[in-house]
Every structure is written in C-alpha cells, then in structure tokens.
Amino acid sequence: MTNRPIVVAGAGAIGCFVGGMLAAAGRRVALLVRPRVKTEIERFGLLLTDFDGSEKRLGAGQLALSEDPSIFHSAGVVLTVKSADTAAVAEQIAQHAPEDAVIVSLQNGVGNVAVLRERLGGRRVLAGMVPFNVIAMGEGRFHRSTSGDIHIGEDAENTAGKLSVAGLTMRASGDITGVQWGKLIINLNNALSALSDLPLAAQLANRDWRRLFADQMAEGLAALKAAGITPVSATPIPMRWSPALLRLPDAIFKAILGRTMKIDPEAPSMWQDLKQGRRTEIDYLQGAVIALAERNNVSVPLMRRIVALIKEAETAGNGPPRLTPQQIRGSA
C-alpha cells in the first residue's frame, strides 16, 4: 500500500477510533469530520481506550482534520463509516478522490456497498464489517467496549492485510456478505438497548431481555433462511444456535458468553442516537431484515413493532423511553 493517506469519511465514534488506531501505528490518516468533532480533537487530542484496559494517546497534529471533502484529493484508501450518509459521501468521493483510491465500507447494514458502487462507477469498492462497539466519552476519548476483528472483502491486493495494524486487526473474508448479515443479526439488539436505556452488558445479564432478543433474532434468521443467505457467526458458536442459547438460564449463558466474547459494562448502542436527538440506523438494521422478509413472505411482527417504537422515540425527541420487555412485546 502506498504512503498516500487513509481518509475516514464522516468520522464519528467508530471512525475516530479506527482512524486513531491507524495513526497511532504510524499510518498517514485524515478525518473528514463535523465541526464539533474537529474542535474537540483539536482541543483534547485523541484518547483511545479499550475494554482490556489499554489506551493510546494522540496529539491533534498526528492526523489531519477537515470539514472540507477536498481532503479526499490524495487519498489512497477511503473508509466510509456512517450508513445514513452513504449517497452524499459517494458524491463527495466521486468529485474529490483519485480514481485509483480504494473505497472500504465499514458501515452498518448490507446495502451500502451497492449504493457506493452505483454512484462511483468502476472504482474499487470493498465491503467491510466492524464487530466492536465504540462509545464517544467526550473530551477526545473514544472507548472500544467489545471485542472482534474487522473483516474486509477479499481482494487480489490484500487490502485487509495492508490496513491491519497492532491493536486493530483486519482480516480478509471470502464471504463478506455472510459476515455482514451475521453482524446485522447481532446488531438487532441495538434497538432493544435504545428502547430500554440499558447497555448491552446489563441486558445480556437479564433473561427476559435475552428472550426478547432471541425471539427477534429468530425472526431474522427465518428471513435469511428463506432468502438462501447463511450468516457467518463472529464467535465459535453457529448463528443458528444463538436463539436457544440466549434463552438459557443466566448462569449457563454467562459461562458460554465468557468464553466467546469480551464485553464491558459501557458497551454502547443505538441509545446514544436517541439520547442526542439523532436519527438512528434502524432502517439499516431491522429495516433491512423486514425488506428481506417481505420479499420472501416471512412474517416478522416483533421486528415491525420494534421499528415502530424506535420511530416513535425519534419523533418524541425525549431520549430512550425506558420500556420493559413486556411493553416492547405489547403485552403490558
């Protein structure tokens, strides 16, 4: 890979963490950011903390910051990270980035790569998947709260291997579609965190919440099966076993989770968007499964109710509504 910069487009929590880790490893990195994020990093620098207790500090001068998409002009790689902005970012890339820049989508959902390819013509666009959560803690601190390696679609140039650095492993995948759907099914829990105002660790410790997650996951897996899609699990446990495992008693579930996934109490979710009055990514998560279910005549009533509740919360603008599992099911 050339020494041309890696540009992170629309850097929020994930983008700042990924870009910061790459910069900490000595890569040339530029962040296309909103004014608030630019001001924060210029004032405080970046502090990248991890669930394992490690941390890295970077001064603002260790990476380039800009609100202007002309920052793409010399990019060797562009990382896109925000699903809702895909079309707009694609237009900016088309206008400013070199024709040979590699575009890597690290966005939630499964439809972003198609949008990028449609709007970017013959440019090289690779799908990717970020398995971990990052929470913006304020004053330049971005905390990775769950484990996992980034997956990028396999290509002849080994883009994944060339981007991989210490502390931020990137792996090439020959089935990136399956990997993306696997991540999406797990991410269905984001809406439950947002509706409950509970972090992931607290929810997973409660069997009622896990049963709700299991029922929603079962709907998603049924839609994927009908469409002939096999999701790839991020853990040694096959995805098809997950609903049954989630329904297990607390002690047994905790023993299994402890061996397959590292997580800390501050794991964030869609609740951050509701807290800050932002539009959520529900249309790219539950919305994508519902669209797939409709095309294959699969019923997903729980997922439809969850989408409706998130939309209500977005419209109300009062933050997470703190619903119980029974209220989400519509039984209370």
Image (tube, rainbow, N blue to C red):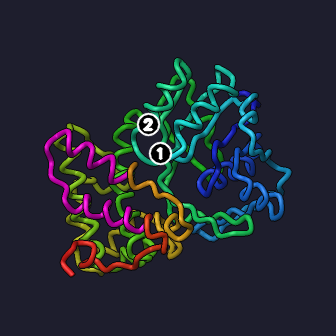
**Observer-nearest residue: 129 or 40?**
40
Q: Position of residue 162 (x, y in %)?
A: 63, 34
| Dominant secondary structure, magenta | helix
Q: Dividing the picture into quarters, in which one does residue 300 lie?
A: bottom left
Q: Can you identify the residue that label 1 sits on? A: 129
Q: Is residue 65 left or right of residue 94?
A: right
Tag of residue 173: 2
Q: Position of residue 258 (x, y in %)?
A: 40, 71
Q: Residue at coordinates 21% horizontally, 46% vertically from top-left?
A: 293
Q: Position of residue 25 (x, y in %)?
A: 73, 48
Q: Position of residue 237 (x, y in %)?
A: 30, 57
Q: Which residues are magenta?
A: 285-314
Q: Residue at coordinates 44% horizontally, 36% vertically from top-left?
A: 173
Q: Dividing the picture into quarters, in which one does residue 158 lie?
A: top right
Q: Is the residue 101 above or below the residue 269 in the image?
A: above
In the image, farthest residue toward the front: 316
